[in-house]
Amino acid sequence: MCSLILSFLPGDAWPVVIGANRDEMLARPWDPPAAHWPERPGVIAGRDRTAGGTWLGLNRHGVVAALLNRTGSLGPTPDKASRGALPLMALEERSAAAAAARLARLDAGRYRSFNLLVADAAGGYVLRGLERGAPETMRLDPGITMITAHDPNDPDSPRIARYRGAFEAAPRPDPAADAWEAWRALLADRAPPADTALNVGPRGGFGTVSSALIGLGGERARFLFAPGPPDRTDFASVI
């Protein structure tokens, strides 16, 4: 189960800031964010070597797209298309609104269930794919939105119940000053109970494999990436 936190503060110099941990099978190979797709100029994203898609990326228009699996849907199945293609589709668009409108027309039955975030400095959307019909689209309100394998801000998600209030209380990151400390500490937290920790220690070949911090400020963007658990791996600037 991955986790993503988004703060939307309209009118701020950096209206959208995002923190995300990727939880995955440790043996599944991947590449850190870069321009891996020559046919998609301006797209910077991590690459899943198994299926060729991505879980998180940013384009030159300041659009972010992130994919999270829903409960009970880890891994591929032979009768479904790869969900990693969905963020790449979103990153072909010039705005989050256009990306959300495009993906809302897809047949969600072609994919295992997913939560897909698309955002830019004007705000964000979450599309829920429930393996039938069209994805359901929700526009994000100002404030903190936390997404896991459950619905956004779902109090029945143990991880959301444990951490959303902590992110609301924490100092908001300032990307211009490279001030991410409070969010970095929360993303790195692996205090027990282990089954609700934001930073998942390796268990049964599964755990937190990377972490990211993103700021969107109109025509500016910041993208920091840690290619390992965030309590043991330094963040480096991608953009």
Image (spheres, rainbow, N blue to C red):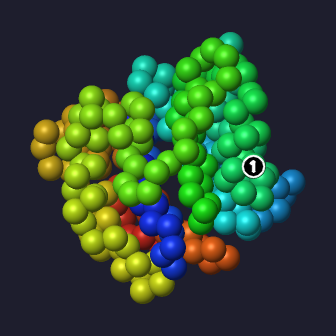
Q: How many residues crowd around disc 1 within 10 Å: few (fewer than 14), some, or many (20 or more)?
A: some
Give the answer, above or below, for where 213 lies relative to 26: below
Residue 93 at x, y percent in the picture: 78, 53
Give the answer, above or below, for where 173 lies relative to 126: below
Q: Is residue 49 left or right of residue 128?
A: right
Residue 139 at x, y percent in the picture: 55, 44
Task: Name the residue located 56 percent from the left edge and 57 percent from the top edge.
Answer: 123
Choose between 199 and 217: the one closer to the eye.
217
Choose between 73 and 134: the one closer to the eye.
134
The image quadrant where one finds the N terminus is: top left
Q: Quadrant of residue 230?
A: bottom left
The image quadrant where one finds the C terminus is: bottom right
Q: Is residue 138 among the parts visible in the rendering?
A: yes
Task: Name the residue located 73 percent from the left edge and 67 percent from the top edge.
Answer: 60
Residue 141 at x, y percent in the picture: 46, 51
Task: Name the residue located 49 percent from the left edge and 32 percent from the top edge.
Answer: 69
Task: Name the residue located 22 percent from the left edge and 52 percent from the top edge.
Answer: 165
Residue reaching furthest left?
A: 192
Q: Is residue 210 among the parts visible in the rendering?
A: no
Q: Is residue 208 left or right of residue 18?
A: left
Q: Is residue 171 left or right of residue 225?
A: left
Residue bearing mark 1: 98
Give the answer, above or below, for where 206 lies relative to 74: below
Q: Amino acid at mark 1?
A: Ala
Could you say whether the residue bearing mark 1 is in a helix, strand or loop?
helix
Residue 22 at x, y percent in the picture: 44, 47
Q: Is residue 183 left or right of residue 139?
A: left
Q: Quadrant of residue 58?
A: bottom right
